[in-house]
Image: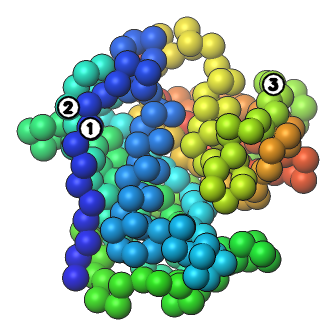
Amino acid sequence: MKYELIKRHKVAYSECGTDGRLNLFSISLLAQNNMTEYWKKIGSDNLVLKEKYNAAWIISKSKNKVIEFPIWNQDIVIRTNIVKKKIASVIVETIGEDTKGNILFIDKKESCVIDLTSRSIRKISTVSFPEDFEPGESIFEDKFTLLNEEFNENDFVYEEKARALDIDFTKHVNNSMYVKYLLNSFENSYWDNKKIEEFELHFMSESTENTSLKMYKKEKDDNSVKMLIKNDSGECVRSLIKYRI
């Protein structure tokens, strides 16, 4: 059986940036919220996994492609599907459309199940998941990028501390907060003549409350910015932003 979660959403004022359009942080939150409700629909949400299996879904990679940022008060439709299932991970695609079916943005996430005690990855077969599951059709075939840029202290931008409201149900920094930390590495004016087309993140380690987070960035000649977040243990998040002028 093919499962799909479809929700209508009106873009709120608090979700928009200085241009009056839905910002990337808000897109990340909308996609994550739709994905967690998808887990609930198929009986595999983190409340169930924690209670029955001492486990939880986490996001290991994320990639956004933006065709057009919706404007404040615009009605949009958000669709979420699992488009690929492996032994220990799934690929989840969330599509944002206008009311005529035109695609506005796509969010692609790789997600896996971890044990809440050992923090190690578990097979999906060890938790609840529909036996009759069939993957949905993927419309975002782009593969995740190999992110291996080297950074040094000359690339350091600023330092942040993970606060109480940055922590989610898994007792670690919510993935969407890293989007906010990274975008805060730029002044608003930096984007005056640039439009973000892709935003990719690879999550390499978890961060807890009061963890110090250091942001690094390198602007490249190909209309891209490569970024890194380090926490107290080392590399935490790698990121790539592509834009057009």
Image coordinates for residue 234, horizontal then vertical, percent: 87, 51
Question: For numbered disc 2, what is the local secondary structure?
Answer: strand
Q: Nearer the viewer, residue 33 or 188?
A: 33
Which quarter of the image is occupied by the N terminus?
A: bottom left
Residue under label 2: 75
Q: Residues within 10 Å of mark 3 (few under 14, many from 20)?
A: some
- Does residue 28 sit above or below 146 in this rendering? above
Q: Residue at x 83, y 28 (%)?
A: 159
N-terminal-most mark, 3 or 1: 1
Please tell me the numbered disc located at residue 132. Answer: none
Query: In the drawing, what numbered circle is on residue 158?
Result: 3
Image x and y of residue 173, in percent: 70, 47
Residue 191 seen anywhere in this rendered image of the structure: yes
Report the amino acid beneath label 3: Tyr
Identify the mark nearer the N-term, 2 or 1: 1
Q: x, y (%) of residue 230?
A: 82, 44
Callout 1 environment at 10 Å: few (<14), some (14 to 19), or many (20+)?
some
**Callout 2 crowding tier (Cα within 10 Å): few <14, some 14–19, many ≥20:** some
* Relative depth, front residue between 233 and 162: 162
Q: Which of marks 3 and 2 precedes in the sequence? A: 2
The residue at 9%/39% (across/down) is 100
Q: Nearer the viewer, mark 2 or mark 3?
A: 2
CA distance for labels 3 and 1? 34 Å
Q: Residue furthest front?
A: 51
Q: Give the residue type that dot 2 points to.
A: Asp
